[in-house]
């Protein structure tokens, strides 16, 4: 006799005797079927729960494996990024010049390489911390035109270079050649990038060559003046005229004697520009005061010309400058 078990199975009972199943048999069979169904369902639930736990454990293991893999990838990416940044920093710092970036409008620096301290003596942090650091440390004679030139940079002039002077931390004047690129975004210049290269040695060599050439050319002019006549007075007059032109000065004169121990000296010959009339007439005797005597001692001890004046290596007293009407 088949009896259903919650619609999912059945309990089959058979008997050889008559009268089976009776009412009592059916009740017992129904109870047995329900117990069987309950056991069967419990077994199924246990199996399903076990499978769910296994699936959850596998999912957790898969997730942990993926997280570990992704973490390793991110760590590798971060390491590679740090390595790339370090290589960039090392590359920039290996450049024999100051690599920099600045705002186009304010000229405040946003980046400067460590070479800045080697070349100029200032820590790189000061360039970034002080917005006007670069402008403030330009040579006073270059500051206005250099700042104006940089502010005038436009997209039509993406790359340019110029040479200017900066004042180092120890007071030295350093010549720098600045190679500049204008960064354009949205059709307008927003940043400047460049490299400053120390060209001080080259500039000094150029100045030395220029000085030597100027001396040679000046000596040629003096020689031409000397060789132009056999008349001594005319010759000295021509030499004084050449001196006025060579030195670009307003007055030149010959004095005698140049003896610091003498009581006085006289003007033997002189030349002046019309707007700077002579202070003394030819032949006038001038007393040799202590300051003039010291000047004569220095001149006699020197192997070449000396420069005296307010900004020269040998300054003049205010009284002497006023008496001689010397401004520079």
Image: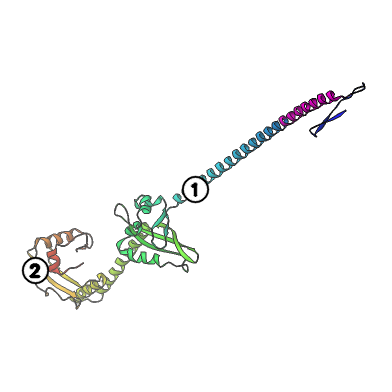
Q: How many numbered discs sit on the rendered protein? A: 2
Q: Is residue 43 above or below residue 136?
A: above
Image quadrant where residue 75 sits: top right
The label number, if any, that marks residue 157 in the structure image: none
Q: Is residue 222 above or below residue 299?
A: below
Q: Is residue 158 at least partly visible in the picture?
A: no
**Label 2 packing within 10 angstroms: few (<14), some (14-19), many (20+):** few
**Main secondary structure along the magenta-highlighted residues:** helix
Secondary structure type for disc 1: helix
**Label 1 packing within 10 angstroms: few (<14), some (14-19), many (20+):** few
Query: Residue under circle 2?
Result: 286
Tell me which numbered mark, 2 or 1, is placed earlier along the sequence. 1
How far across and how far down the image is residue 66, in percent?
62, 40
| Range covered by the magenta-colored residues | 20-46
Q: Is residue 85 above or below residue 312?
A: above
Image quadrant where residue 46 sits: top right
Q: Is residue 118 above or below residue 230?
A: above
Q: Is residue 263 left or right of residue 90?
A: left
Asked if labels 1 and 2 touch by Cβ distance under 8 angstroms, the answer is no
Image quadrant where residue 3 sits: top right
Is residue 9 covered in magenta? no
Secondary structure type for disc 2: strand
Extreme residue in the top direction = 17
Q: Is residue 55 left or right of residue 226?
A: right
Point 72% across, 31% down: residue: 45
Point 29% across, 52% down: residue: 170
Q: Nearer the viewer, residue 26 or 305?
A: 26
Extreme residue in the bottom direction = 274
**Quadrant for the C terminus in the image:** bottom left
**Quadrant for the N terminus in the image:** top right
How far across and how far down the image is residue 12, in percent?
86, 27
Query: Residue under circle 1?
Result: 85
């Amino acid at each position: 006799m088949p009896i259903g078990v919650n619609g999912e199975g059945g309990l089959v009972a058979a008997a050889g005797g008559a009268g089976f199943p009776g009412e009592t048999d059916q009740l017992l069979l129904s109870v047995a079927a329900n117990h069987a169904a309950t056991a069967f369902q419990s077994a199924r639930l246990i199996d399903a729960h076990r499978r769910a736990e296994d699936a959850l454990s596998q999912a957790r293991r898969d997730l942990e494996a993926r997280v570990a893999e992704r973490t390793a990838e991110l760590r590798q990416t971060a390491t590679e990024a740090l390595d790339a940044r370090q290589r960039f920093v090392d590359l920039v710092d290996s450049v024999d010049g100051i690599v920099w970036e600045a705002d186009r409008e304010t000229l405040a620096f946003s980046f400067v390489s460590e070479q800045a301290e080697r070349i100029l003596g200032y820590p790189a942090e000061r360039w970034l911390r002080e917005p006007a650091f670069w402008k403030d440390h330009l040579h006073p004679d270059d500051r206005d035109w250099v700042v104006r030139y940089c502010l005038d940079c436009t997209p039509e002039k993406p790359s340019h270079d110029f040479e200017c002077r900066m004042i180092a931390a120890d007071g030295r004047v350093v010549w720098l050649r600045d190679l500049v690129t204008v960064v354009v975004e949205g059709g307008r210049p927003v940043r400047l990038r460049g490299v400053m290269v120390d060209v001080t040695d080259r500039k000094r060599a150029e100045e030395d060559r220029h000085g030597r050439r100027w001396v040679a050319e000046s000596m040629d002019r003096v020689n031409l003046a000397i060789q132009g006549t056999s008349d001594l007075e005319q010759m000295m007059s021509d030499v004084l005229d050449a001196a006025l032109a060579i030195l670009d000065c307003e007055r030149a004169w010959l004095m005698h004697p140049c003896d610091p121990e003498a009581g006085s000296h006289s003007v033997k010959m002189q030349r002046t520009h019309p707007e700077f009339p002579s202070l003394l007439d030819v032949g006038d005797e001038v007393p040799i005061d202590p300051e003039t005597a010291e000047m004569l001692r220095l001149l006699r001890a020197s192997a070449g010309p000396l420069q005296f004046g307010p900004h020269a290596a040998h300054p003049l007293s205010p009284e002497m400058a006023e008496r001689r009407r010397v401004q520079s």
